[in-house]
Image (tube, rainbow, N blue to C red):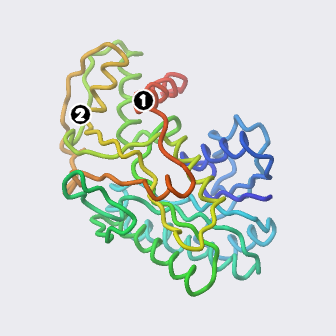
Amino acid sequence: MKVLITGIGGFAGSHLADYISAHTSDEIFGILRDLEKDDNLRQLDGRVQLSTCEITDFQSTFKVIKEIKPDIIFHVAGQAFVPSSFEHAAETFKTNVIGTINIFEAVKASEISPRIIVVTSGEVYGETFGLPALHTEQSIPQPVNPYAASKTSVDYIAQTYKKYEGLNIVIARPFNHTGPRQKPNFVCSSLAKQIVTLQRSKSPMILRVGNIKARRDFTDVRDIAQGYWMLSQIDNKHNYIFNLCSGRIYSIENIIQLYEEILGVKFELNVEPKRLRGYDIQLLAGNASAINHSVGWKAEIPLKQTLTDLLEYWNHKEI
């Protein structure tokens, strides 16, 4: 089979390529904005066939899809950083919404019928109001930032193309995930990079942080990648929207404590106003029982191991 991954050079896309390469003999194709930005794919040693494409341009997208004629498309590309969505709301919607529509229209114009895994986000749900009530796929989306609003739009558009255009779509709603290769503007990776930088310079162990009381459902990106693949293999005649999450909730303070346990050190915290958002979801957590019952997927990798691997990743990077 031919598998196409949009955003293959990014955080989740590259781990998905790793998983498919390790567990199947399928042909793997990938879309990049810039073919030179393939650092996250070097370990695949030519196993992936890359194309340059701007998904916000229909003709560019159509050309790639028509030439490859994929059996499975994982649409992972997008603008995923919440603070950037406030600064660049129009660009966020253009990339996330128009890019997705172009994928769907290119599939229609190519007269193919691939399984399409559309990645939206657990952010669509907004605040989780108390425990033990975690968001299920039946929770009503209540986005509270432009990124979440764009992903809610993608989610509804995907449902429309499935129901009324007949596209073979499965929607994945991943909650927070982290691990090696994550950009340092995301909290777990930011902390890991800061820690490695402080260790190298032998500086005082002072971490620059924002709201450390916010709580999230964190999953290892490698578990998420496996989940995406498993969703590409299911019979989705009935259920086709799935949360991907661990069901384990950690505050940012808990994350810092885990880093302290891993390293045997104690950090001093410096709360920086620029790292505080005007509005920050205090608790965002999900229920993954639907995907567990459908394909047996669940998050397996302990967060402490994920954070250890993140530190190792940054230890091997030039900073």
Residue 71 in the figure: left or right of residue 262: right
Residue shown at 40% from the left, 65% from the top: 137
Residue shown at 47% from the left, 39% from the top: 220
Give the SS element for disc 1: helix
The three-letter code of the residue at mark 1 reads: Leu
Residue 189 in the figure: left or right of residue 268: right
Q: Position of residue 152 (x, y in %)?
A: 40, 70
Residue shown at 34% from the left, 46% from the top: 217
The residue under label 1 is 307
Residue 300 in the figure: left or right of residue 49: left
Give the SS element for disc 2: helix
Q: Position of residue 228 (x, y in %)?
A: 58, 54
The three-letter code of the residue at mark 2 reads: Glu
| Quadrant the N terminus occupies | bottom right
- Looking at the image, the residue that sits furthest to the front is 293
Residue shown at 49% from the left, 52% from the top: 292
The residue under label 2 is 253
Mark drawn on residue 266: none
